[in-house]
Each structure stands twice: as C-alpha cells, then as structure tokens.
Amino acid sequence: MTSLSLVRTPVSLGQISSLENLNDDVLGLICETVHELTKANAEWLASSESECFCVTNDYDSDSDIDSDLESELSSTSSDASNEYWSWPPFSLKPLSLTSRRIRAFCEPFLFQKFTISRPCDQLLEKLSIWNPRVYVRKMDISLYMGFQEKPDHLRDLPRTLAETMAFISQSQSARPRLNSLSMSIDEKQAHLLKNAISAVQAEYPRAIEFPGIRHLTIGPNNEFILKYCPNVETLIVEEARSPSAKKVINGEHSFRVIREAGKLKKLNCLVMRESWTEELMTALYEAVPNIQMLWLEEGPNAAMTFEPFLENIAKFQNLQKIGLASVPYLNEKIQPYFQDDYDLWVDQVDQAEKRIAEMILGEMGGSCKNVGEVWFGFRTSYDAKKARVEVNEEGRKTVQWSTGRPADGPDWE
C-alpha cells in the first residue's frame, strides 16, 4: 500500500469497529492520516488534543487515560453514538472510543502536551507516578517560586523533573516525537535543575537527549538546556518576570545564550529581547553569522545610535527577514509624544519606519542585500507592522505594508 485516501462521509460505529480486523500497519496509517486531516482545521485540532500531564494555576490533571477509556467504553451504544457525533468529523476522539486496540493507536496523537506552570505541593507526587509513554510532542515548563510554595516540599523537584525528562527522552529514542520545548525557570531552580540533569547524565550516559526538538523557547538562565537539543531551528529567548512582576534583566545571560546558540548547526531563526550594545552585536555576529531570520526586540541601548546598529545588522549576509523594535526604541530622532500632537507623532513614526525599511531592504537598494521583509514591534504584538518588497504588474518594485501578529505565522514560531 503506497497511499491512503479518506472520503468525508458519515460512518457508523459498526463500520468503525470493523477496523479491528485490520493489521497494525494499516490501522496505524489510518490513525495518522485522520490526525493529519484534523490538523488542517485549527478548531478541530484544539478539540482533539489533550494534556498528557498538566499542573497549572487553575487546573491539575495527570490525564488518567486508562480510567477515561474504562468509563467511556462502558457507556451504552446509544451514548457512544451521541459522543461520536458531538465531536467534529474526522476527529480521533470518537475513533479512539471504539476499542482498546484502536485507542492504543490513537493515543500518540490524542495526548501530546506536558505542562507545568506552578510548583505546587502535589507536583512531586504527580511526576513520580506519571507514565510518559511515547507520545509527548510539546513540553512547557514554567517554574517561579512564590510566597505560597514550601521550599522543603520541593527540595526533590529538580531531581524528579530531571528523571522525568530522562524518561521522556528514553521513551522516544526509537522515534522522537517531542518537537517543541518551552522552559522558563527562575535562577535558583534553573541552577538546581542543571546540576540534577548533569547528575542523571553521569549515572546514565546520554539519558537526556532531545534530537527531535526544532522549536525552543527559554527564559533567562535557562540556556543550559540548549546542549541537549542539538537540532533546534528556531530559538526564542524571552524575558522573564518574577512574582513581583519586575523584569529580570541580566546582560551576561545574553552573552551565554549567544555562545550556546552558536553551537546549533541547524539554527535559522533567533528572537531575543535585549538592550543591544556594540559588544552584544559583535558577539551575535561571531556566533551566528549565517542566520536567516533575526528579531532584535528592545533596540539599541542609549549609547548606540541607529546608524551603527544598522551597520551591525548589515554584516549578516544570509539574513532574509529582520524584526526590530518600534521606532521610538530605535534611538531615532522623532518628536516626543504629547497628547496634543498625537497625529503628528504617529506621522513621524510612520515616516521613520518607511525610511528605515528602505535603508534595510536589499531589493530597494538597502544595506542588507538579501532581506526582503522587515518587521517593527514585538513578535507577540497584534499591531506589529511588516514591510515587504513586491513587484507590481508593471514590473516595478514597491514596499507593501501590513499589520498582524508575527507569532501567529509559521516563520516566527
């Protein structure tokens, strides 16, 4: 069998149950194909994926999949039919409820997310009894100690979390599924986790490796995880906030991240928020001279004007897309904003953006010969502006402007 085609027609539960007679290879292919069809619609995908482990501020779950299946399969056929049609067509959810054998093939696609966003007292217990199996595709770990947490109860957390990461790594050794990792841990916990991972690696060499991760997001002081993710293509370095909502600023952290990023052979997209200095820009170029997409949030520091900042950007000969902070953060000379002359201020910002875009866009004679797209604003902002070179019907090159949220697009994620 070289291909499989599925037609969107109503299917009875009896017909679906007949899948039991198929061999493992065909049944696995059907489940994977249904999953791919589901991904074509974001709304359906949101309905068909679940957390395989989740501890957050408002939701705790260890996703007892077997218990869920036991209760769902014990329902009447009438209830099962209602359950089937309450889910979107071509969702794996109803298919997974027909039998335990089919459920086993569906689980790798149904339960994919591992999330921790608070260090509660129950976290250690949940981690110790959780079975990672083989289907984790996305991990999101955010740990910032507040006043309510009891340090004594969490003293074993770094070791337990390191062992859990090792279990996930080893369970995926034959076929890596984990492709996305987000890690933002406060400085103390990050230091403890780094030591715990090193201890696990010393006891069990190569116990923790994530070769399948392509998208990595880290907070300050979390750059140690980069050495275990050698095939990262997109690296996003976010600023973190302490429980008191104050920004964590650490210039040395940026130098460490840049040095580690230089070791990633497949890196093609880097996003960093930093007050850029001449030294940082030099270190960045030396580490990733062939980067294709670069988003330098925050802009140059007060000691660097925009012209030398642009000169440093122009060194990246393979750069295709560049994201910059909003014009007021680029040390451009525009009139300060006052309420009475808001329209004038907006006009000055617009004119400055147009001037800077043409200074950068290579096809418009700018200094970055391969750059065809310039963004202004923050990657997660819904009103970020994009300047892109397009050719009209007469063959003339013009700069087209649009507004959107870059993080929603595939190129900045």
Image (cartoon, rainbow, N blue to C red):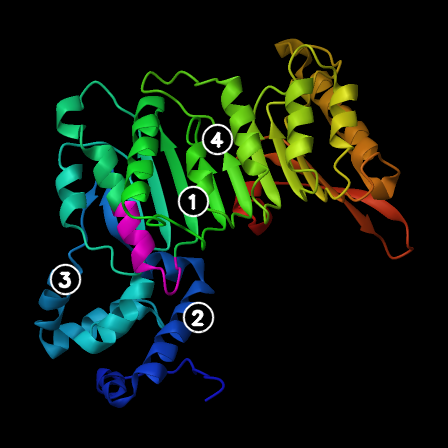
Mark 1 or 2, nearer chain start: 2
**How far is disc 4 from disc 1 in space, using C-alphas?**
19 Å
Residue occupied by mark 3: 68
Mark 3 or 1, nearer chain start: 3
Query: Residue 176 in magenta?
Result: yes
Q: Nearer the viewer, residue 376 or 189?
A: 189
Disc 4 vs disc 2: Cβ atoms closer than 8 Å?
A: no
Label 2: few (<14), some (14–19) or many (≥20) C-alpha neighbours in 10 Å: some
**How far is disc 3 from disc 1 in space, using C-alphas?**
34 Å
Query: Residue 232 in magenta?
Result: no
Amino acid of disc 3: Asp
Residue occupied by mark 2: 37
Q: Which mark is residue 228?
A: 1
**How far is disc 1 from disc 2 in space, using C-alphas?**
32 Å
The residue segment tinted magenta is 164-177
Q: Position of residue 69 (x, y in %)?
A: 15, 66
Up-down: is 280 above or below 413?
Answer: above
Residue occupied by mark 4: 238
Q: Is residue 396 left or right of residue 109?
A: right
Mark 4 or 2, nearer chain start: 2
Label 3: few (<14), some (14–19) or many (≥20) C-alpha neighbours in 10 Å: few
* Secondary structure found at label 4: loop
Amino acid of disc 2: Leu
